[in-house]
Image (spheres, helix red, strand yellow):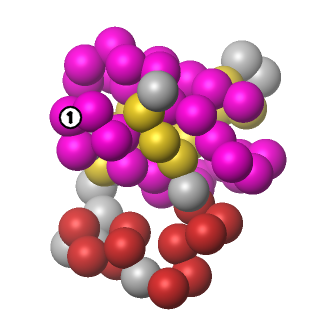
Amino acid sequence: MEAICPECDAKVYFEFQPKKGQRVLCRNCKSILTVIRLAPLELDWAFIEPFEDLLSDDSKERTAWMG
């Protein structure tokens, strides 16, 4: 599954089925994003806690990468 980063227009790929409200990191521009729609999959900028939260050990369910 993939969506487009609203910051840099790069494709953001999801390793797992995304959930609405899920936070992800665009590996291209490092923007922190949130899933705002599932069909079609759409991302927007997130207003969240510090960036380090995305890099915690439980981040596997939030994994995304730029390809």
Q: Callout 1: 10 Å neighbours few (<14), some, many (20+)?
A: few
Q: Residue furthest bottom?
A: 57
Q: Quadrant of the N terminus?
A: top right
Considering only vertical position in the picture, is 14 above or below 4? Answer: below
User: From the viewer's perspective, is 28 left or right of 64?
Assistant: left
Place of residue 19 in the rendered image (x, y in percent of width and height, measured from the top left): 71, 51
Q: Is residue 11 above or below residue 20?
A: above
Quarter of the rendering containing residue 63: bottom right
Per the image, is 10 magenta?
yes
The residue range painted magenta reads 1-30
**Near-viewer residue (47 or 8):** 8
Res 42 seen here: no
In x, y percent, where is residue 5?
Answer: 38, 25
Local secondary structure at mark 1: loop
The image quarter containing residue 48 is bottom left
At which x and y percent is residue 57? 50, 85
* Residue at 28% in and 55% down: 47
Looking at the picture, tell me which residue is in the foreground, 67 or 13.
67
Residue at 56%, 82% in the rendered image: 58
Residue linked to disc 1: 29
Query: What secondary structure do most residues of the magenta stretch adopt?
Result: loop
Residue 12 visible (yes or no): yes
34 is higher (above) or lower (below) than 13: below
Q: Amino acid at mark 1?
A: Cys
Q: Is residue 51 left or right of residue 39?
A: left
Q: Is residue 11 left or right of residue 40?
A: left
The percent coordinates of residue 22 (x first, y second) are 57, 55
- Left or right: 38 as drawn, with respect to 2: right
Whether residue 48 is in magenta: the answer is: no
Q: Residue at x 63, y 26 (%)?
A: 2
